[in-house]
Image (cartoon, grey):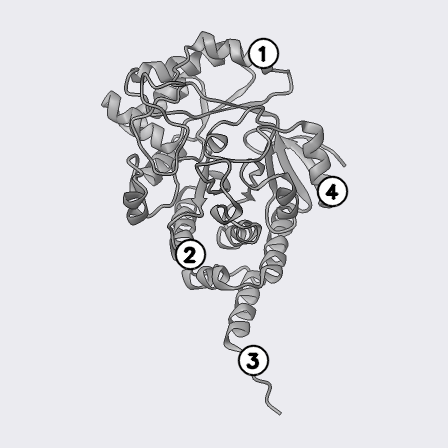
Amino acid sequence: MNVIVPTQEKQMMSIVDKVRHGERLSLEDGVFLYQSDDLLTIGQLANEVAIRKNGKKVYFIENMSLYFTNVCEAHCAFCNFRKDEGDPGAYTLSGEEMIAYVEQHFHPGVREFHIVGGHNTHVPFQYYVDSLKALKARFPEVTLKAYTAAEIDFFSRISGLSYKEVLQELMKAGLESLTGGGAEILSDHYRKKMRVDKADVSQYLDVHRTAHNLGLRTHTTMLYGSIESKEDRVRHLIHLRELQDETNGFLVFIPLSMQPINPKAGIRRRNSAFEDLKTIAISRLMLDNFQHIKAYFINIGVQLTQVALTMGASDAHGTIVKEKISHAAGALTPEGITREDLIWLIKGAGRIPVERDTFYSEIKIYE
């Protein structure tokens, strides 16, 4: 008797076979996984890849998110953080003001400042250089992970310097890594429709390429859950995978779940838990040349983050202290988390918590 295997099941079996034999997944494979409702198989497969790459270790860092200015020339449709100069709540901090803020919240375990902000045309490029210099002078032992690729492109425009020259100036001031923001969805059609009036697809990738060629290891993201198609998401991952093939400069990929502008928005305006977990798992499967996929509790919540650690994620982010951008957009999650809670969360998923630095050097393993 012949057993007839449904086409969908055959395609899933083909993907399982590819992953287990270390073969790269195609655009069609990625789209198929997004269209499948077999989350358990996708998650199990992603978990196998994560364990193959990192064992049962899940990484976290003691860090602080800092925002020097929220004044921004861009008007991205999804952003509620930006302000125009003179708006209520608009601010631009000096280095001294930022140091005063940090000293209120700082403790000796903090290893990284995560620095992003608006594209503020009311201050010169030197302001952004001096901001880093001030922090590095006061906290020399803390790694400066600063600015998005879109900010680097903006600095290039206002200064007349090339990407390479901008990055070199910032590196002299203490820059050690770039943040991953500004990627949104790497599709020109999406960027036009969502009014992403900042670095385009090729510029975003070229900033990271330039940074990698200068010896900087960087982070990268995808903001999903608005108008993009499933194919757009997979193409985004392939853009990043191709650049990683070229430079091997990315440390981690961070899927960012889109937040509604209004914190009171109902569940139908938010990504489902199913979609969040599937995106993390598919990212792990598509990005075969990335060491880590991050579960970002700020956007998906701490409990779903814990589940994500069994579906492909090997990084639980960090303590943060006070996150502002996702919360300005309506995130309902905590603004930060303690080291003890992170350790509890990771152990609760049957994983081994590992405190790291920005570059994934292991500081302490919590067996």
The amino acid sitting under disc 2 is: Lys
Q: Are marks 2 and 1 in contact (CB under 8 Å)?
A: no
Q: Are marks 4 and 3 in contact (CB under 8 Å)?
A: no
SS under mark 3: loop
Q: Which residue carries the number 2 mark?
A: 230
SS under mark 2: helix
Q: Between disc 2 and disc 3, whose residue precedes? A: 3
Q: Quadrant of the C terminus?
A: top right
Rendering quarter of residue 168: top left
Question: What percent of the width, then of the height, locates residue 133?
Answer: 43, 13
SS under mark 1: helix
Q: Between disc 4 and disc 2, whose residue precedes? A: 2
Rendering quarter of residue 315: top right
- Disc 4 to disc 2, how far (Cα)? 32 Å
On residue 352, the disc is: none
Image vertical order of residue 164 relative to residue 346, above or below? above
| Crowd around label 3: few <14 · some 14–19 · many ≥20 (10 Å) | few
Q: Farthest residue to the bottom: give it.
A: 1
Q: Farthest residue to the left: give it.
A: 160
Left or right relative to 360: residue 244: left
Q: Which residue carries the number 1 mark?
A: 104
Q: Which residue carries the number 4 mark?
A: 348
Q: Which residue carries the number 3 mark?
A: 5
